[in-house]
Amino acid sequence: MLAGAVAAGGVAAGVATTGPTAAPRGSALPSAPRSALAIPDPRPLAREPHLTRWAPLRRAVTARADPAPAGASVARLSPRTPEGTPHPLAVIGRRADAAGRIWLRVRLPVLPNGTTGWVPRRAVGAYELVRHRLVVDLRRLRATLLSRGRPVFRAVIGSGQQRWPTPRGEFLVRNRLERYRSARYGPLAFGTSARSATLTDWPAGGFVGIHGTDRPELLPGRVSHGCIRMRNADILRLARLMPVGTPVTIR
């Protein structure tokens, strides 16, 4: 959504747009497939409640259906997002192949939402750990930020209209963008890995964002093209609490 512009009313730019072109500045990142060819990694990922592990993609790479060089191609990934910021990937598994090479299972920013794939460990940078989670409730039109499982932020939201629904699933905050020329997106936006299944012809494929608005009187409501809108005071408050790499559950 937020590549050079944010989609009018909702789906993220890089994605989009009708209306004035936005000129955001992106912030830098902080420093189920088959497994027939895999063997258990002797050092599996440690599990901890409320912890998410992510890593920035260092180079272009093909995500595979299996953790092996001969695995079927699932998606081709770029080290930069459509907005020009580093590309973080949520890491949800780790395996070694028969040759001892380490592969990571990651969530992919592709349709259908929820697709995962395997990438070589050497293709991504150091792990970053996040103990936050943003939960978006589309029925109640509420967003809640959790820190170590405890709520630290709540706000009403705007979501997608019936013909442009906000996708449900597990996603990741990929970047933080600000300084838009158009007030319709508010002072700040977060780009996510969620993609619209109905606006796939928009630039960059219709990534969904979380941003402010110049129409706070419409909230709460189903008013966007798929993005999640917040009142400007709320998006600024969220920005003080939510880091890039935070997982987003939309339900």
Image (cartoon, rainbow, N blue to C red):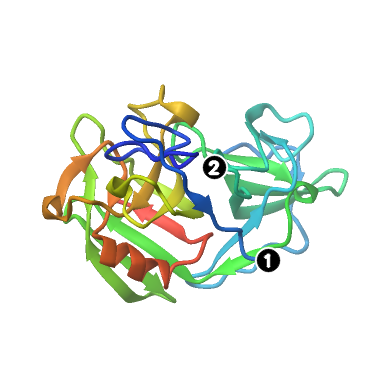
Give the numbered dot on residue 31.
1
Amino acid type, residue under disc 2 in the picture: Glu
Front residue of 26/219: it is 26
- Between 42 and 9, the residue placed more toward the observer is 9
- Residue ID at (46%, 41%): 114
Provide the secondary structure element on which disc 2 rests. loop
> Foreground residue, 135 or 84?
84
Q: How many marks?
A: 2
x and y, in percent, of residue 106 in the image: 60, 47
Q: Is disc 1 placed on a helix, strand or loop?
A: loop
- Residue 173 place in picture, x, y as percent: 48, 54
| Sequence-earlier tag: 2 or 1 | 1
Percent x, y of residue 214: 22, 51
Which quadrant holds residue 37? top right
**In the figure, 68 relative to 232: above or below?**
above
Q: Which residue is drawn at 74% across and 48% down?
A: 58
CB of mark 2 within 8 Å of CB of mark 1? no
Residue occupied by mark 2: 83
